Amino acid sequence: MDLDDPTHRALFLLLGHQSEREVLRARRRTLRAMRTQVREQGRHLGGRPPYGYRLVDAGPHPNRVHARWGRRLHRLDPDPVTAPYVRWIFARRLAGDSAAGIARALNERKVLSPSAHDPDRNPHRAGTEWTLRTVAEILTNPRYTGRQVWNRQRTDHHETIPGDKNTSLGPSRVWNPRGEWVISERPVHPALVSEADFLAVQQVTAVPAPKDQGVRRYLLTVLVICAVCGRRLDAHWVHGRPEYRCRHGYSSARSGEPRARNVYWAERRIIDGLLYRLSYAGELPFLADASELLDHLRTRRLVVVCGTDTLDVEPVDQGKQVTPTTIITRMDDSGGG
């Protein structure tokens, strides 16, 4: 091949596009076959077994070629050590316990968390205790009803140019919408909870809607950061108004741990304080409103760093904080506090 010859270069491009077409075609056929195997056959397609189960032999592989190579099928079977805890988690949730309360009870009883119970299959997890999220994921996993489930998660490469792997920002696992999950048509392994109880638990864990069915707006979402731990403040509705708080990673799943004082700010207090100080600093006009303040923060890539009684405005560079330029030092009686 002569790369200086336009005809040869065109042939290279043609062969490259043909190869990419074959790859996409093979991927599409493979995914379609996997969906059919899970939905109609309930086949286990690999991966770590969920907490409460273990993998056992399920006979030779149905494909004769794979069977000659010694490959065998596997299925899920209740783990005699961890399965009772899964049943207990569902029973306590049906009894009205919160996910955080269940996690706290498991920690107090010194029950090993999923990653601590099976560290060989969880080398990427260093957690040694139960968390609210761990319990919540168990309560929403349909595999505990005896049905096989596939495609709950996918690998996202975060490509800035879709399809161009050279622009990937690194892979991460993300959850697929529930409508894309593939669930077997019938139970294929022993269930740890009945389908009726599982559906009842989903009603308990549903996100509550406001009683007045109104729309709640938080103007400073993702713009307020904790000065103590660096986390973004959580938005929540209190006494009919938006407010923000940070508990520095603490949850009610833990008990008896010393921790820093919560950072707590009302949205109106933050906005009034910023408008007062920034107007006197000449950054905003004296009659500026909340919308002008938000535009000022976003166009200049600024975030509000909240302490227990301080407010700072700092620049952000691609989501990472740099050396702060403090504009507001402390809230006092004259500054909307």
Image (cartoon, helix red, strand yellow):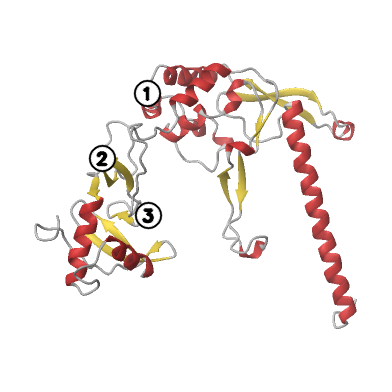
Residue 179 position in % (x across, y down): 61, 37
**Quarter of the figure with the N terminus:** bottom right
74 vs 225, nearest the viewer: 225
Vertical position of residue 330 compared to residue 242: above or below: below
**Residue at the (39%, 32%) spot, across then down:** 208
Measured Cα–Cα span from mark 1 to mark 2: 28 Å
Give residue 8's position: percent from left, percent from top: 89, 76
Q: Position of residue 127 (x, y in %)?
A: 45, 38
Q: CA distance from mark 2 to mark 3?
A: 19 Å
Under mark 2, the amino acid is: Val
Q: Determine crowd level at label 1: few under 14, some 14-19, many 20+ residues with C-alpha closer than 10 A.
A: some
Which label is found at residue 83? none
User: Taking the image as drawn, is residue 2 in sight?
Assistant: no
Which residue type carries mark 3? Answer: Val
Identity, as a three-letter code, of the amino acid under mark 1: Ala
Quickly name the residue at label 2: 238
Q: What residue did someone put label 1 on?
A: 105
What secondary structure is marked by label 1?
helix
Q: Quadrant of residue 211?
A: top left
Lower sequence index among marks 1 and 2: 1
Q: Is residue 170 visible?
A: yes
Give the class, few, some or many, for how many residues have Cα within 10 Å of label 2's Cα (few <14, many ≥20). few
